[in-house]
Image: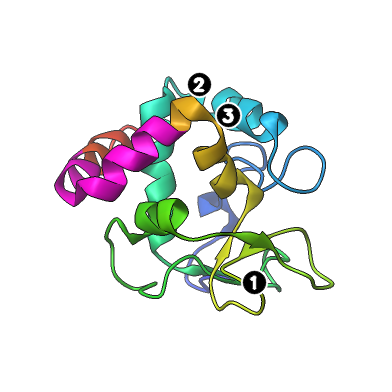
């Protein structure tokens, strides 16, 4: 089993509680927006909260052995900041050509990745509004993330 060895299975998030990386056809589409809203609305979260909580992707990376996906979301995966939102806005994300599940990369052979559920945050205009706010204002992102995370 991957992950922490000092923690039992009771501390693992049950299937269906967190959103899937890609819920419809390969790549981001409207079904991914609907899926994010369905998962988070069960917990009382709106679009702003969904985007703020997605900012947790500023930390860490995907591992093929755990999820099938591969790579970090940002060049600073051990620093909590608003780089995830800046990258969503500023980088041209392209489909990665590889044998794993559909994901995006920052240019051919890029070192960063985004999931379809990340890219939908800039394709859905209601989500994109908040991506832009957090890309421009790290203090606002940190405040909102803290507030929503405490409600999880």
Image point 39% across, 57% down: which residue? 84
- Checking the image for residue 26, the label placed there is none
Between residue 7 and residue 63, name the one nearer to us. Answer: 63
The image shows residue 2, relative to residue 47, as above or below, that is: below
> Which residue is the site of mark 1?
70
- Quadrant for residue 49, please give it: top left
Q: Is residue 46 left or right of residue 137?
A: right
Name the front one of labels 2 and 1. Answer: 1
The label shown at residue 39 is 3
Q: Residue at x 59, y 37 (%)?
A: 17
Question: Which of 123/8 is in front?
Answer: 123
Q: Disc 3 or 1, which lies upstream in sequence?
A: 3
Predominant secondary structure in magenta?
Answer: helix
Asked whether residue 99 is in view, the answer is yes
Q: Magenta stretch: give its range.
A: 128-143
Tag 1 or tag 2, which sits nearer the N-term?
2
Q: CA distance from mark 3 to mark 1?
A: 23 Å
* Residue 125 magenta: no
Residue 10 in percent (x, y) is at 55, 50
Mark 2 and mark 3: Cα distance apart in space: 6 Å
Q: Position of residue 133 (x, y in %)?
A: 28, 38
- The residue to which callout 2 is attached is 41
Q: From this view, report whether residue 123 is shown above or below residue 65.
A: above
Q: Is residue 152 visible?
A: no
């Amino acid at each position: 089993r991957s992950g922490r060895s000092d923690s039992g299975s009771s501390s693992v998030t049950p299937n269906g509680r967190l959103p899937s990386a890609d819920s419809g056809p390969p790549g981001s589409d409207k079904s991914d927006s609907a899926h994010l809203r369905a998962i988070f609305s069960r917990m009382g979260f709106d679009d702003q909260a969904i985007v703020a909580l997605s900012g947790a992707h500023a930390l860490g990376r995907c591992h093929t052995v755990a999820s099938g996906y591969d790579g970090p979301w940002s060049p600073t995966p051990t620093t909590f900041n608003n780089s995830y939102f800046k990258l969503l806005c500023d980088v041209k994300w392209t489909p990665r050509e590889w044998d794993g599940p559909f994901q995006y990369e920052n240019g051919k052979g890029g070192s960063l990745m985004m999931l379809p559920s990340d890219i939908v945050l800039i394709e859905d205009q209601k989500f994109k509004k908040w991506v832009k706010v957090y890309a421009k204002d790290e203090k606002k992102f940190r405040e909102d993330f803290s507030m929503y995370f405490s409600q999880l």
